[in-house]
Image (cartoon, helix red, strand yellow):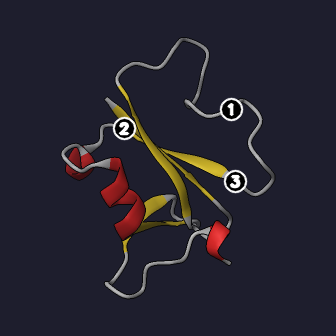
Amino acid sequence: MNIFVKYDGKGRILSVTRVAKMPEGLKHPYAVDLEEGVEVLAIEPPGQFADMEPLDIHNNFAVDVEKKTLVKQRPGKIRPSKRSE
């Protein structure tokens, strides 16, 4: 199982999905052409995130854009989604 996190240039998570097996030739399960400034982080193997629901990852983490890793957000410091700006 792999976890894929779609995020924007500020590290805000836009989408999280789990995939048991990726179809051959695809790097991630999102559209081939991502919007400008949007990237996908693949977490292989999922390690500490294996038992977490995608919504929990979405709500409690952000992406460190420079390190390309998930970072825990402090309660009350969760970044608003792009849609709420």
- Tell me the kind of residue under disc 1: Ala
Cα separation between marks 1 and 2: 20 Å
Q: Name the residue: 44% across, 59% down.
A: 69
Q: Secondary structure beneath disc 2?
A: loop
Say which of 66 and 20 sits in front.
20
Q: Name the residue: 30% across, 37% down.
A: 45
Q: Could you tell which of marks 1 and 3 lies nearer the N-terminus?
A: 1
Q: Which residue is mark 1?
A: 31
Q: Secondary structure beneath disc 1?
A: loop
Relative placement, left or right, of 3 versus 53 is right
Give the tally of numbered discs. Answer: 3
Q: Which residue is mark 3?
A: 38
Tell which residue pokes out farthest to the front in this image: 84
Badge 2 crowding class, 10 Å Cα cut-off, few under 14, some 14 to 19, many 20 or more, is few
Q: x, y percentage for residue 31?
A: 68, 32
Give the number of the mark in front: 1 or 2: 1
- Tell me the kind of residue under disc 2: Glu
Q: Name the residue: 37% across, 33% down.
A: 2
